[in-house]
Image (spheres, rainbow, N blue to C red):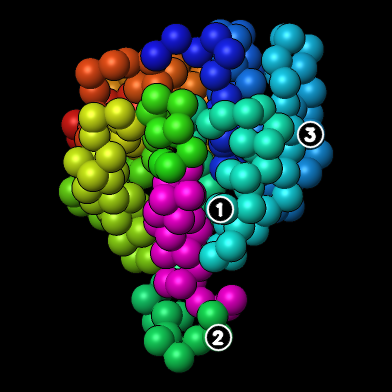
Amino acid sequence: MDLKGKAALITGGARMGGVLARELARRGCHVALTYHRSKAGAEAAAESVRILGGKAVALAADVRAVGAPRRVVSRVRKTFGRLDILVNMASVYLETPLQNLSPSAPRRADPWRESLDVDLGSAYRFSLAAAPVMRKTGGGRIVNFSDWLAVSGRPRYKARLPYYVAKTGVKGLTEAMALELAPDILVNAVAPGPILPPAGLTSAENEEVIRATPLKRWGGADEVAKAVLFLVESDFVTGECLRVDGGRHLL
């Protein structure tokens, strides 16, 4: 796909969405970004697109809301006249011991439902909303965000059951959606590993990540953007889940 003149929608992605938005803009793409709480980050990313000559808009949206995808997609279409690329980056990472999980927990306080609603459900709902719009202009690309653990088929860490299940579901969603939407819409996923150190990471924890990663470093948001761009620009890759983990899955 030639990105010049195309329109992309990035959901969430407070830490990495801005980098991807700029790289899309450098290739001539217009960009819309959604945000829930990170308005300043989304607005800054949109401004960086405008500086590079593209059109951009930052849209407030709670991706858990059933009606949000159609509202957002409609706004993108009205703003740019089209939608060619959807990047489902919205995600929550909840560390939850098993004993804290309960099927009777209130919906908005339940890590299980939160993970499924945001990490998996939003990708499903936004994809359904975007596909008909993409087809009106000849097709498009959808890139979902899974996780290196889910794609490697081993959870490895405790206290992340809802997150792991949701991200494993994203892999399945990607494969099934790729079959359903072929041949005009290509659907793939990125599975990041150690990309950006989380806030509060101790020196010992950082050293452990480096030790366990064959490439011996954190990847950085640029590496994720490169992976997404490869999948977006490719015309013959669909149903794939690309690990961007510095070889972490090998150990």
Q: Amino acid at mark 1?
A: Pro
Q: Earlier in the sequence, mark 2 or mark 3?
A: 3
Residue drawn 50% across and 86% down?
105
Above-or-below relation of 67 to 15: below
Tell me whether the residue at label 1 lies in contact with that at label 2, contact meaning CB atoms closer than 8 angstroms.
no
Q: What is the secondary structure assignment of the residue under circle 3?
A: helix
Per the image, label 2 sits on a secondary structure element best described as loop
Look at the image and tell me whether residue 246 can be seen: yes
Start and end of the magenta stretch? 108-130
Q: Does residue 19 appear left or right of residue 214 in this picture?
A: right
Asked if residue 116 is among those painted magenta in the image, a careful observer would answer yes
Residue 178 marker: none
- The disc label shown at residue 106, or none: 2
- The secondary structure that most of the magenta stretch takes on is helix
According to the image, label 3 marks what residue? 43
Pointer 1: what residue? 69
Residue at point 60% right, 10% down? Answer: 28
Q: Position of residue 179 (x, y in %)?
A: 20, 41
Residue 90's place in the image compared with 4, above or below, is below
The secondary element bearing badge 1 is classed as helix
Picture residue at 31% right of the left edge, 61% below the top: 165
Mark nearest the camera among 2 and 3 is: 3
Of the pair 38 and 76, the residue shown nearer to us: 76
Residue 73, given in percent of the width and then of the height, sits at 58, 44
Q: Earlier in the sequence, mark 1 or mark 3?
A: 3
The N terminus appears in which quarter of the rendering? top left
- Is residue 133 in the magenta section? no
| Separation (CA) of disc 2 from disc 3 | 32 Å
Q: Which of the 4 image quarters holds residue 147?
A: top left
How far apart marks 1 and 2 lie (CA) works out to 24 Å
Q: Position of residue 89 (x, y in %)?
A: 50, 41
